[in-house]
Amino acid sequence: MISRVMCGVCKEQKSQMPNSVDFSGRPFHFIGIGGIGMSALAYVLAKRKLPVSGSDLRANHITQCLQALGTHIFWRQDPANLKFFSTLQELPYSAVTATTTSEEVAGILASPVNDALTNHTQELPQVICSTAIHPDNAEYQAALALGCPVFHRSDLLAALMQDYQSVAVGGTHGKTTTSSLIGYVLLQAGLDPTIVVGGEVNAWQGNARLGAGPYLVAEADESDGSLVKFSAQIGVITNIELDHPDHYETLDQVIDTFKTFASRCQTLVACLDCPTIRTEICSARTSQSLVSYSLQSDSGASYTVDNIVYHPNGTIARVWEGNTVLGQLELKLLGQHNLSNALAAVAVARRLGLDFTTIATAIASFEGARRRFERRGEYNQILFVDDYAHHPSEIRVTLAAARLQVQGSEFSQGQQRRVIAVFQPHRYSRTLTFLTEFSQSFAAADMVIITEIYSAGEPDLGHVRSQQLVDLIAAEHQDVYYKPSLPLVSDFLKAHLQPGDLVIFLGAGNLNQIIPEVMAFHHALEVQSPQEVVFP
């Protein structure tokens, strides 16, 4: 058995945590501010006009957005960063700005007047960390030594939930799309919600928005067990599977985490199509506090569908609320899994009192979240799709959606349309645990390319290699290739993609970094022709 990996600062913090997060004006400092979950929280605080700083190792478009809001970001994780706001108490604000270099800040902070400020712990920031931050991190250790209040990011989100009527969306798969759908419905209904999700959504140009309304919609992550901290007016559980063997040794441990989460939610919206939810979670709820949904019309769920049509442009279904027909639901998102996500959004919105016409109109215009079957471009009659799928179940449903898209497209040259799957395994622990399941997940692809494993910070214990996965896939699939590095993947796709292909990049790592390069190559090859592939 692979040993469990220490989950960052979570274990350390149990004895270090202060009682509550202070939103009255005390500064916040995020160690690792550029992460998708951390940056969303930093954005909400910055938009609330609270002083925010952070550190990270590299810039990206998300950190640029935070800097535009006045957030100061250091490009190294250094204990001196923690004195930034103390310095501002003594200096004109213009002396240290969002563009001041780390070296300049270090010089200011080294002055005698600022050394004296370390004795005033009330002027030091509240420090926010994620599980990705190791307890040995120098900045984290300095925060403890200086007496800074130190919080895990889940504690900050839990505190924000108490300021709103909150909707927390949990589940092994579909959290980002479901929470984004719910937030979008409330936004289109004029309720001006605050939204914190684990992916970027074009509708609010990022992974978070601050609204003036009473509702907060948040994605509730179970990966490190911190899901148990959330208390929400409405909790959603989409499905339950083992997905994070770096933290959980068994499915039973995952179930216990979701049971605790469910017990802390006033109303639970749960999917009966997941056997684990049906038997382990719903049985403990009273009918008054449980709202269920299912794609099976005979399931007895509170919300069901029938007359389902899956097509290359999306999905159509008739929605039932108990024994009453609400009406027709149309969505642009592909596949059975996205219909389930949309039905969860219907259930939540109805619980909040919205009429079905408003709900259906909003869902019909929802474009999806980035990296969730995101169409990145079409060049040389090749469609490029980016998807975050990194679990066997996610890969299967995503490739099924890709196959649906291909089957519904016209190819006037008479050639066979192909689905090309490029997969970067994510984490050694997940790859080893689900090696067999991964190998059985690519049946809907015509060609499979596998890269080496993206570690996501895990140590390589030498227990698993991508070549093992390639060999298992090859036993059932005739067209599978091992290209360990991203440059090798890029070169292979430049040489082997052909007009009519749908190439989908799968994984939660950095595989999608090569998409622009491959698209640019095929764009250069593009020749205008009266015979073209027409993608819906």
Image (cartoon, rainbow, N blue to C red):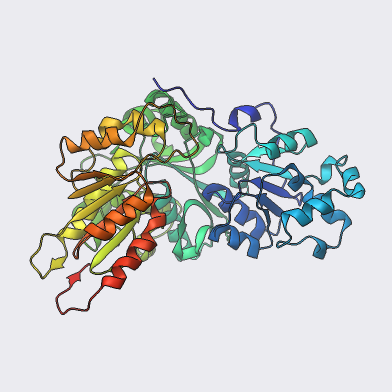
Question: Which residue corresponds to the image point at 22% horizontal and 49% vertical from the top-left?
Answer: 400
Place residue 67 in its image quadrant: bottom right
The answer to whether one can see residue 51 in this image is no
Q: Position of residue 361 (x, y in %)?
A: 35, 66
In which quadrant is the N terminus drawn?
Answer: top left
> 509 and 523: which one is in front?
523
> 350 and 9: which one is in front?
9
The answer to whether one can see residue 180 in this image is yes
Q: Eyeballing the image, is 322 above or below 256?
A: below
In which quadrant is the C terminus drawn?
Answer: bottom left
Q: Position of residue 349 (x, y in %)?
A: 42, 54
Q: Eyeballing the image, is 265 above or below 88?
A: above
> 76 and 394: which one is in front?
76
Q: Position of residue 496 (x, y in %)?
A: 22, 57
Q: Is residue 123 found left or right of 171 in the rendered image?
A: right
Place residue 89 in its image quadrant: bottom right
Q: Eyeballing the image, is 445 above or below 203?
A: above
Q: Is residue 280 found left or right of 100 in the rendered image?
A: left
> 218 and 320: which one is in front?
218
Numbered-mark total? 0
Q: Position of residue 5 (x, y in %)?
A: 50, 27
**Looking at the image, which residue sits at the far left?**
414
**Looking at the image, which residue sits at the far top?**
1
